[in-house]
Amino acid sequence: MGNDNLLSRDDVLGRLIANRYLVEETCELTATGSSYRAYHVAEDRAVLLRILPARGGMTREACRRALTLAERASALPSPHVTRTLDVGFVAGRWPFVVSEYSKGRTLAAVVSQTGALGIKRVLPIAFQLASALQTAHGAGIVHGAIGLGNLWLESLASKPEWLRIMGFGLSELPGSDSEGPISGIFMSSARPNTGSAPTCSLPEIRADIHALGSSLYELACGAPPPWGASEVGGILDSDFANSGFGGHRASMRGFAAIIERCLYLRPETNYDSLDQVSYDLACLEQTAAALALEPSARDPMVAAVHSPAPRARGVRLGEPKVIVRGG
């Protein structure tokens, strides 16, 4: 069946997975996993079936933890979290995740095909991702595996580009061959303990924030960030400016500052929560929208900040309380 890491399309199409999912059509094939439209035989409906690269050490306890976390995430009150319907394994090696069906593709496939995205596309996607993770953290859930391969961009005629986060629970699955794979397909309907309210630790929150920053950089530049660099600002000119990210210089600088606070560990400037990231992204989106307008249509405050102001008559530097503009 396929190679040691990924199942081939020929091994999957037309096959009945877990005795209930008939694989009908390929949605996309990437190095991070393959997506298919499948027919749920028992429930008579279409579902999205993702088959991921093979992983070793698949203990039943790891599977149980993964499914529990996926079920908790599916109950989050966020429209940007994909509802997980099922989790299992093909031949005990290749994890599969079943979710609600929607047309679209992962951001990994989008970037692979089109390269870097422009600022008008990246900012709304970034805000949706940050707000959804903020909701998850508020419920005591961390994703732990954020990447472009787990971010699904839906094709909806009635909305702009609509992001859905997949892969909650996958961080619970081991990646080594320490214990060897289990045989068959394991499923569990375990539910989380509803005792005390769950919380996320600061290291867990920052791990998701770090992965968010890496994903945003890859969207804007078309490639993962250069981890040898000490500051995003130092590579802004060479990477952002040449990537087609576009936009006003101030918007690019603001976006780079947000990524830098996500990626580089500096206690005095690091983000400690997703609500801080969401706030900065919302402010940047408003500023970018204002800067895209004709100067005459801009908000006066924005124009005053980003445009050279006419010289004020009769006012010395350091003293302006009320500025009277003159010719």
Image (spheres, rainbow, N blue to C red):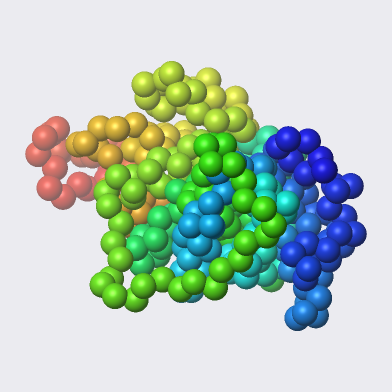
Q: Residue at position x 28%, y 62% from top?
A: 199
264 or 7: nearer the viewer = 7
Q: Position of residue 57 (x, y in %)?
A: 55, 43
251 or 113: nearer the viewer = 113
Q: Is residue 164 above or below residue 290?
A: below
Q: Residue at position x 71%, y 37% from top?
A: 5
Q: Quadrant of the C terminus?
A: top left
Count up the numbered dots: 0
Q: Residue at position x 81%, y 70% from top?
A: 39
Where residue 49 sits, quadrant-wise, is bottom right
Q: Position of residue 293 (x, y in %)?
A: 52, 50
Toward the bottom, the furthest residue is 43
Q: Quadrant of the N terminus?
A: top right
Q: In the rendered image, is residue 175 in sight?
A: no
Q: Is residue 73 above or below residue 236?
A: below
Left or right: where 23 falls relative to 160: right
5 or 48: nearer the viewer = 5
Q: Position of residue 314 (x, y in %)?
A: 15, 38
Q: Position of residue 103 (x, y in %)?
A: 75, 62
Where residue 192 sits, quadrant-wise, is bottom left
Where residue 165 sits, quadrant-wise, is bottom right
Q: Residue at position x 20%, y 36% from top?
A: 268
183 or 312: nearer the viewer = 183
Q: In the rendered image, is residue 18 in sight?
A: yes
